[in-house]
Image: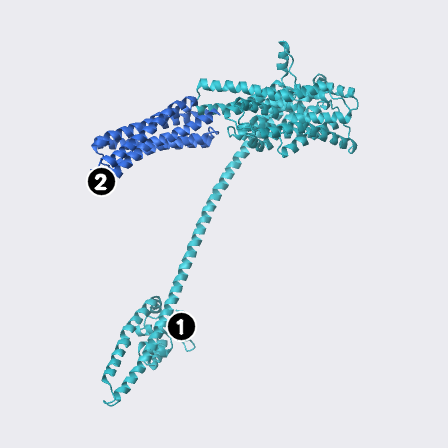
Chain colours: A cyan, B blue
Amino acid sequence: MFLFFLSSGLFLGWTLGANDAANVFGSAVGSKMVKFRKAAIVASVFVILGAVIQGAGASHTLGKLGSISALGGAFTVALASGLTVFGMTKFRLPISTSQAIVGAIIGWNFFTGNPTDYSSLTKIVTTWISGPILGAIFAIILYISLKKLIRKLQIHLILLDAYIRNALIIVGAFGSYSLGANNIANVVGVFVPSAPNIVLNFGLFTLDGVQLLFLLGGIAIAVGIITYSKRVMMTVGDDIMKLSAEASLVVVLAHSLVLFVFSSSSLSNFFVSIGLPAIPLVPVSSSQAIVGSIMGIGLLKGGRNIKFNVLGNISIGWILTPILAGLSSFISLFFVSNVFKIQVSEGSEKAANQAVEIGLQTLDKANNNSIDLFQPTLYAIILALSAGVAFLLYKQTRYKKEKNIASFNEQEKTYQIQTNLLKKEIESTNLTNKKLENEVNYKKQELMNFALSIIQKNEFLEKLKAKINKLKDKSDLELNHDDLNKLSRLINENLNLDKERENFDLYVSDMNSEFFFRLNKKYPGLTENDKKLCALIRLKLSSKEIASLINISPKSVEVNRYRLRKKMNIQHDERLSDVINKL
Amino acid sequence: MKIFKTSKSVIKNIDDFYDTIDIGLLNFKEGLKHYLDGNLAEFEKKLRTLEKLEGKADAIKRSIENEFYLHSILPNFSSDVLRLLEKSDDIIDMAKENLSQFDVEIPNIPEVLINDFIRLADISVAATENVIPSARIFFTSPDKAKEGLQKVAFYEREADKLANQIKRKLFREMDELKLSEKIHLRYFALHIEEISDASELVSNILSALILKSRM
C-alpha cells in the first residue's frame, strides 16, 4: 500500500529527472561536448548518491512547511505537483519542481485547515529570490577567474577543449549530486512522515527508512534522466543565451554550488561555528539557479545576448507554478477525500507535528527494527556479477551471431545481385534475339517484295516482247525502224534479267545460309538447283511465280518439285512445303 | 585519457601543417628567384619540393578534419577553425600552382622587370609570413593574434600597388613587347599577387574567430 501511494512521488521524481538533469548536462550535451549516454550514467549515479547521503537537510524545512501526516495526503500532494510539472513541461513552459511541491503543500494546508508555517514559507520563498542571485554572483566570480586563468596559462584551444570536456563531466557529477541532495526533498519529502520504521544493514553501510525512501526517489529521478531527458537536453542548451564551452562549465558549477549551499548541513554548521547565521536548508529550484547563473554571465558581457522574451516566459512560469500546483492539489484532495474516501490528514496539527518528528528521527527509533542484510547484499553482489558475466557472454554470442547473419546477408545480397545481373543478361539476349528475328522477318518480307517485283517485271517484259514480235511481222512500209530500235533498247536496258537474278540468288543464299546448312546436313544429295527450289518454296511462292523467277516453265517447276520429293523421301500424305518449313 | 591523446595529436598536426606552409612559401620564393636568374635546374628542384610539401599539407589538413569531425572538437567554432585551415592550405596550393605555371609556360621576363617580380614575390609572401604566426598564436592566446593581422593588410595593399605598377610598365612603357607577351606577363604578376589576397582572406577569418572566442 505504501508503495502504491509512493508512486505519485516516484512520478514526480521521474519528471524532475526528465527536466532538471537538462540544467546540469543540457549545455554540455546540446553542444556535443559530452555524449548523452555518458551524461545520463554520471547524472543517474550521482543523483542517487546525493539523495541518499545528503537528502535529509532540505526535507526538514519542507516537512515543517506542511506536515502531511497521512499517506493519502502525501500521495495526492505529490501527484498534483507531478501533474503540474508534467503539464507545464508539455506546453514548453519552464518550471520548478520546488515551487510546484511548495504550492501543492500549501494547497493541502488550505484543504485540511492546517496552518502554514510562515517562517518556513518565508525561508523557501526567500531562496527563490536569493537562489538565482547567488547563482549569478557565483557565475560572475567563477567566469572572471576562469578567463584569467586561461589567459595566464595560455593553454592551446584544443587542449582546453579536452580539459573543459572532462571538467564538464566532473562538474556535472557534482551538480547531479547537489541536485539529488537538494531536490530529493521535493520528490519524496512529503512521504517522510510515513517512511517505514526500519534499518537495513548491508554490512559496509546501513540505510534507514528515510534513506530508503530517498534511494527510491533517487532511482526515479535516474529513470527520468535516462528515459526522457535527452530531448530536453538537446533543446534547453541555448534557450536563454548562446553559451561558450567555458561559460557552460561556469554555469553548471555555479548552479551546483547554489544547490550544494542550500542542502549541506555541514556547511551550515560551519557557518554557525564561525559566528555567522545558519544557511537555510531548503529545496531550491534547479531551474532558477541555472537561469540566475546564465543571467550572471549575460550581465557580465553587457546583457546584449540575453533573450529577454525567454526570461519573461520563465518569470510567468515561476508565478504560475505554485498557484497551479496549489489549486490542483486542493481540487485533487477534495476528490480523493470525498469521492475515494481516502484519509488525507491525521486531523490535528499536534498529531501531524508528531508524525513529522517521528518521520525525521526514524534513525533513532529504527534501531529496534534493524534488519541484517549483509548476507543478502553479498549474494546480490555475487548474483549481479554473475548476471553481468552472463550478460557479457550473451552479448558476445549475440554479436558473433549478428556478425554471421550480417556476413550471410552480405553473401545473399551478392548472390541476389549476381542473379539479377544474369536475369538482365538473359533479358538482354532475348531482346537481341527478338531484334534479330524481326530483322530476319523484315528481310524475308523484303525478299518477297524483291521476288514479286521480278515476277511482275518479267511478265510485263514478256508481253512487251510479244508485241514487238508482232510488229516485226508487219510490212516494211508500216514499220518505223527507229521506234522498233528504241523499243528493243529499252527492253534490253530494263530486262537485264541476268543481273537481277544474280542479285536475287545472292540475296537468297545470304538469307538462307542457315537453312541451307540444315538442308545439307539432312539431305546431303541435293543439287544447287534443288536447294534453290527449296528456298523459294520456303518463301511460300507458287509454282508459277517460281517459274517466272528462275526463268523456266511452270511445268518444269512441277517436275522439279516431284523430283525433290523423291530425293527427300517425302510420303504421299506429306506436303513438300510443310517439310521444308519445319527445317 | 583518449581525449587528451587526440587533442595532443591534433595540436601537433596543426603545428606541422603551418610548418609545412611556411617552408613551402620559402621554397616558392627561392624557386621564383632561381627562375628569374635563369637557374632552371634549381628552379625545378624547388618546384618538386614545393609539390611534395603541398601534398603533405593536404594530407595533414585532411587528418585534422577527420579528428575534428570524429571527436567533435571545439564544437562551438569547429567550422570556422576548419575554414581557417582550408584557406591556409589554399595559400600553399596557390604557390605551387604559380611555380608550376612558370614551369609549363616558361614566360619570358624582360630584364627590367626582374627586380619588380622579385619584390612582388617578397611582399606577397611577407603577407603570408605574418598571417601564419597569427594563426598559430590564435590557438594559445587569441588576443595576441590580432597584432600580426594589421601587417597582413599592409602587405596585401603593397602587393596590389606593385602588381599594378608592373602592369602599367608592361602596357605603357614596353612597346618592344608584343601584346600577347604583355598579356602573358600580366597574368604572372596577377598570380603572384593572389598569394597576398589569399593571406588576407585567412586574416579575415582569423579576425572573426578572435571575436567569436571573446564572446
Tell me if I can see residue A392 in this picture. Answer: yes
Residue A215 rendering spot, x and y as whole percentages: 65, 24
Q: How many dots with numbers?
A: 2
Kindly report the distance in space between the C-alpha atoms of the residues bearing marks 2 and 1. Answer: 87 Å
The quarter of the image holding the N terminus of chain A is top right
Observer-side mark, 2 or 1, equals 2
| Res. A579 mark | 1
Residue A183 rendering spot, x and y as whole percentages: 64, 24
- Element class at badge 1: helix
Q: Is residue A8 left or right of residue A504?
A: right
Closer to us: A195 or B121: B121
Based on the displayed image, in which of its 4 quarters is residue A554 positioned? Answer: bottom left
Kind of residue at disc 2: Lys
Closer to us: A29 or B93: B93
Q: Chain of mark 2?
A: B
Residue A81 rendering spot, x and y as whole percentages: 68, 29
Q: Residue at x 64, y 30 (%)?
A: A15
Residue under label 2: B178
Based on the displayed image, in which of its 4 quarters is residue B55 positioned? Answer: top left
Q: Is residue A184 left or right of residue A489?
A: right
Callout 2 crowding tier (Cα within 10 Å): few <14, some 14–19, many ≥20:
few
Q: Residue at x 51, y 39 (%)?
A: A402
Q: Chain of mark 1?
A: A
- Element class at badge 2: loop
Closer to us: A556 or B26: B26
The quarter of the image holding the C terminus of chain A is bottom left
| Res. A531 mark | none
Closer to us: A99 or A450: A99
Q: Is residue A330 left or right of residue B131?
A: right
